[in-house]
Each structure stands twice: as C-alpha cells, then as structure tokens.
Image (cartoon, helix red, strand yellow):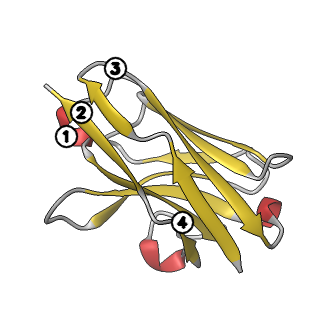
Amino acid sequence: QVHLVESGGGLVQAGGSLRLSCAASGRTFSRYTMGWFRQAPGKERDFVAAIAWSGGSTYYSDSVKGRFTIARDNAKNTVYLQMNGLKPEDTAVYYCAAAATQYNIKYRYEYDYWGQGTQVTVSS
C-alpha cells in the first residue's frame, strides 16, 4: 500500500502561483511514477503532469505546459507541482497518484493509489 496526502491548495488570484505537495508513505516511493490529476465540478478527472521514478522524464498536458512544473524528492518521499500563471480555468480539486508502470501514465486507469485531493481556486 501507498498512502498519499496532498497539501498546498488554496485561493489565489489569476496570475498567481501555488505549490502543491504530495507526501507518500508505505511501499518504496522511488519505484513509482507519480502523477497529478485535477477534477473540476461536473467534469472528468484529467491528467495534469507526471514524473518518472528517477525524475528524469516529465510529462504535461497541453493546458499547463510552460506554466506548471512537476518535481520529486525521493529522499523525502514527496512530489511537487509548482503552478505559475494560474488561470480561473485551473480551478479544480487536484489529486496526487502513484503508478507502478511507466507506460500510458496520462491515463487514470494506470494509477494504483490516489490521495484525497486538495482544492485550488483561482479568482479572476
């Protein structure tokens, strides 16, 4: 089992920044691909970003590329999502997830463990 706890969400004005953190406990964190997804009210849970177990490869959705940065610290069992240039359309609950695979990591079904989510609200 891997237990994931997100933090760092909140209310921010458009153009502002937030950094989300996801602390992991349980099985070896460094063996997992880590991802961030988000879900706005009435919408599907969408892929945001992912990072390989080594941190050497990162992946982003087109909607956040160039604004968000994913990073991980395996010594601290933590993955981060730095969000800059926030827009009202970024408003959602953000979820951290862990996948044992390195393939198809933009798809929810590849992830084995999920956190409870943290709310991000961007005001215009």
Residue depicted at 67% across the width and 62% down the height? 33
Q: Residues within 10 Å of mark 1 (few under 14, many from 20)?
A: few
Q: Which label is found at residue 122?
A: 2
Say what amino acid the circle numbered 4 marks: Ile
Residue depicted at 41% across the width and 35% down the height? 65
Find the distance from the CA under tag 4 to the CA under tag 3: 28 Å
Q: Say whether marks 4 and 3 touch (CB < 8 Å).
A: no
Residue depicted at 33% across the width and 61% down the height? 46
Lower sequence index among marks 4 and 3: 3
Find the distance from the CA under tag 4 to the CA under tag 1: 23 Å
Tag 3's secondary structure? Answer: loop
Query: Mark 1 = which residue?
Result: 89
Tag 2's secondary structure? Answer: strand
Residue 95 visible in this rendered orientation of the protein: yes
Q: Say whether marks 3 and 2 touch (CB < 8 Å).
A: yes
Q: Nearer the viewer, mark 4 or mark 1?
A: 1
Say what amino acid the circle numbered 1 marks: Glu
Looking at this view, is 57 or 8 the one in front? Answer: 8
